[in-house]
Structures are given as C-alpha cells and as structure tokens.
Amino acid sequence: MSRSRTRTALVTGGNRGIGLETCRQLVAAGHDVVLGARDAARGREAARRLKSDGGRVRVEELDVTSRDSVTACAARLADAGVDVDVLVNNAGVYPTDSFFSLDEATMREALDVHLMGAFHTGQAFVPAMVRRGWGRVVNVSSGLGALTDNVPSPPAYGVSKAALNALTLVMSAAAGPRVKVNAVCPGWVRTDMGGSWAPTGVEKGADTVVWLARLDDSGPTGGFFRNRRRIAW
C-alpha cells in the first residue's frame, strides 16, 4: 500500500473482542484509528488502553443501526479533517435462537447490525474513498453465513452474515478496483461473543482482518477470506 501519508482506519464495534484487537494491530502497524463504539464510555476506556501503547486513537460514538448516528459521525470526522481510508465493519451480535423459536425482533436486530450497519457505513464513507482513488473495506462475516458448504446458522446470525456477504459483492462492484472490498471469516474466536472455549485466540482472529485492511494495490477485491486464503461463499 502507498506510504505517502498515514492511513486512518475506522473500526465499528472497536471497544472489545476482534474489533479492539483489530484496532491494536492497526495502531501497531502505524495507522491512525477511529474506534467506533455504541457506548462512548466503553469506547474511551478501550482507547485508553490503546493509547498507553503510544497509538493515535480517536473515539467516536457510533450506532451502525442508525443512519443518523453514522451520518453524524461522518460529519464530525469531516469537520475535523479526518479522511477514513479504511473501513472495518466489525460490529456484531450473536443470537442463537433456533428457527422456530426465533422472534421477529431478534431477526431484525441481526439484520440491522450486520447488513444495514455495513450498508449505512458503506454509503457514508466509501464514496470519498472512490473520489480519492484509494480505500479498503473489510466486512467481518462468518463461515456460518456461507451458502456453499452449509445452511446458514444459527438462523438470524447466519442469514444476516450471508446477506453481508452479498452486500460485499455489491459494494465491491460499485467501488471499483482501486477500493478493495472484501469479507472475512475470523474463525471461532475466544471473545465475549465467541466464548472462552473457542479454539482461536483473538490475535489470530484479527490477523486476516488487518491483512485485508492493509492490502497493497495488487490485492484482491470482492472476495471472502479465512486465514488469508479465499474461501467459498
């Protein structure tokens, strides 16, 4: 990737888990980071830990399910002269209800966070990447949303991640070749969401996210990746 200036990355759901580790690895790689968090107090606490390592971190209150919240965040960053070069759509929920016990509110929440959240942020931040001729978008998805090898499951989670995968292809086609838009399955990761029994550490879970966020100009776009390798949709 170009080193003409420091790139700025916005990470949604950046105050914990894979999002926080992604922020940490991006800071270590020399990026400025905008840590987006629905709860600003938790975002500030997470940022304090990152700043203790010398990182340049800005906290933004950001609820990706609300277009108004995303638009307001974009306006604040624009007013501050902050260009978002890298967008990591990481905010997530993990409902485990079976299909017949799944209520509509839970299904809508999963779609609002995973699909509509990335839709809102993509519309808010990707057009400027296209105008500048450089950008990276990483949609944190899951193999549980893959259609090729399994039925998406648990239902609300899997269907909403499958929808995010479809949106990844739509965004990639719209953005053009100079803005790399990809989806990633980080694996089953030991986080508050994944549980303490998950086999993958958070550092490895964030590795492919950060790799996609830092692709050079010859890197892929419109793909789905796990462990830095393309996987089937």
Image: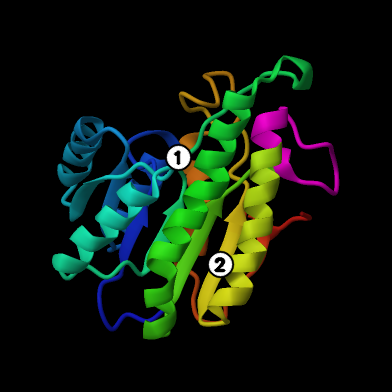
Q: Nearer the viewer, mark 1 or mark 2?
A: 2
Which residues fall within the magenta stretch?
A: 144-158
Residue 139: quarter of image? bottom right
The residue beneath circle 2 is 181
91 or 216, which lies in front?
91
Q: Amino acid at mark 1?
A: Ile
* Residue located at (81% from left, 46% from top): 147
- 47 relative position to 181: left or right: left
Q: Residue at horizontal 70%, vertical 36%?
A: 158
Q: What amino acid is found at the position of numbered circle 2 in the picture?
A: Val
As displayed, is residue 194 above or below residue 1?
A: above
Q: Secondary structure at mark 2?
A: strand
The crowding category of the residue bearing disc 2, from other C-alpha atoms within 10 Å (few below 14, some 14 to 19, many at least 20), is many
In magenta segment, residue 7? no
Query: What percent of the width, then of the height, locates residue 69?
Result: 31, 47
Position of residue 153 relative to residue 116, above or below, is above
Earlier sequence position, callout 1 versus callout 2: 1
Q: Does 95 sit left or right of 214 as displayed?
A: right
Residue 37: image x %, image y %? 31, 40
Residue under pointer 1: 18
Instruction: Name the foreground residue: 192 vs 68.
Output: 68
Q: Quadrant of residue 15?
A: top left
Rounded to the nearest angstrom, the CA distance separating label 1 from label 2 is: 19 Å
Residue 31 location (% of width, % of height)? 29, 63
